[in-house]
Image (cartoon, rainbow, N blue to C red):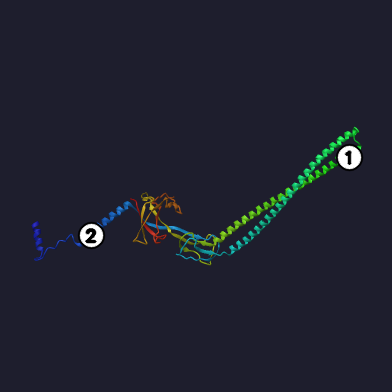
Amino acid sequence: MSAQLKEIAAESIAPGSQLPARPSMYNKTNITATLILIMSTLWLANWFYQRAGHVYVSDARIASTMIAVSSRISGWIDEFPVEEGQFVRVDSVLARIDQREARLRLAELDAQLKTIEAEYAQVESQKHLVARQADTRLEAQRSKFRAAEAALSEVKVTLAQTESDWQRARLLLDEQIISREIWESRKSDFERGREQRNRMDAEVAIASAALLEAEANLARVDVLENQLKIITNKIAVANSKRDQLLLNLDDHIIRSSINGYIDETFVNAGEYVSRGQRILVSHDPDNIWIKANVKETEIRHIQVGTPVNILVDAYPDRVFRGEVSSIGNAATSQFALLPNPNPSGNFTKITQRVEVHVSIDQIDNLLKPGMMVELEFDSS
């Protein structure tokens, strides 16, 4: 059977014709396919190797502290010298609000304060005058009182002596040793001494009353001192109001608290702003970081200090360096504004995300808040 097949095959070949050449296994197509297969295999091997020792995040963003500058007072904007994209220094003027009304209130309060201070000076002068007069009169009354007491003591001694002489004269009169004229004379001396003592008692009482009155005048000094304390409190209240008006006046000039860029403005010169109304938003270009949401299944491979390679979409040909600065303590779903109830009992498990902050240094002001970046965490 095989011989017949060979004969039939031989007859089917035309005389003078050649058998078709066998294709070579080293042609360009096979070599190209083989190289592509090898390169794909190497790429996949490297991809798996990288995935085994690294954590990738492709939806991270550059973040910064966006400062919303608001007005602390209401009023008309006189000046608004900044514009979007402008760089401003600390204490640079961002806006000026009309100050005329505040200055008028301050001038009125200054006038009131001067009036109160003049009143204080007047009462203080009156106090010093009253104090000097009271001290002088008190000293004079004390001297008179001491003199009256001394005179009374002297009169009392004399009265005792005249009374003793009179009593002795009466005994001598009874024994008829002296005459009645002498006894009458001793009696008259005693009565005059008693009257003089009564007069001196009255003078001591008068001097004592005058001394009490002089001491009472010192109370006027205390009254004036209390008035001074009241006026002092008024001055303190006025100064406090003045400080408040000065603060209010200073609030009419809105200044920058940072060195940064003006990102967006919301008002123009000539507009009326209300208290608390935002006028612009700015940020410090040196105060930036990267906010990334890492899968909970990969967070165990990351810790504070882990180095990070950063690819910024805006600069695909550059690689930036950073490191993990903080790791969140709760999944991002816990901060959702709307809760996620499950009343039906149906449950679909979703991988949660944990917020991770990556520190990065600003370079030539290339990195801007909101830029998309891809992160490669070295978890090996």
Q: Nearer the viewer, mark 1 or mark 2?
A: 1
Question: What element does badge 1 sit on?
Answer: helix
106 vs 267, left or right, is right
Amino acid type at image mark 1: Ser
Q: Nearer the viewer, residue 212 or 225?
A: 212
Tell which of 339 and 114 is nearer to you. 114
State whether residue 1 appears in this view: no
Residue under numbered circle 2 = 33
In the image, 205: left or right of 123? right
The furthest residue to the bottom: 270
Q: Most extreme residue toward the top, as rendered?
A: 175
Residue type beneath disc 2 = Ala
Foreground residue among 267 and 238:
238
Q: In this rendering, is residue 349 above or below 366?
A: above
Would you say the residues marked 1 and 2 are in contact, meaning their CB atoms lie under 8 Å apart?
no
Where residue 281 appears, x then y in whole percent? 47, 61
User: On the rendered structure, is 377 left or right of 234?
Assistant: left
Mark 1 closeness class: few <14, some 14–19, many ≥20 residues within 10 Å: few
Q: Which mark is residue 211?
A: none
Disc 1: which residue: 185
Dot 2 alpha-carbon crowd within 10 angstroms: few under 14, some 14 to 19, many 20 or more: few
**How far is disc 1 from disc 2 in space, using C-alphas?**
167 Å
Residue 242 visible in the current orientation: yes
Image quarter hosting the N terminus: bottom left
- Viewer-proximal residue among 233 and 274: 233
Q: Earlier in the sequence, mark 1 or mark 2?
A: 2
Residue 286 in the image, given as x and y percentages of width and height = 42, 58
Q: In the rendered image, which quarter is residue 168 located in?
A: top right
Label 2: element kind: helix
User: At 28% from the left edge and 55% from the top edge, which residue is drawn?
Assistant: 44
Q: Residue at x 52, y 62 (%)?
A: 254
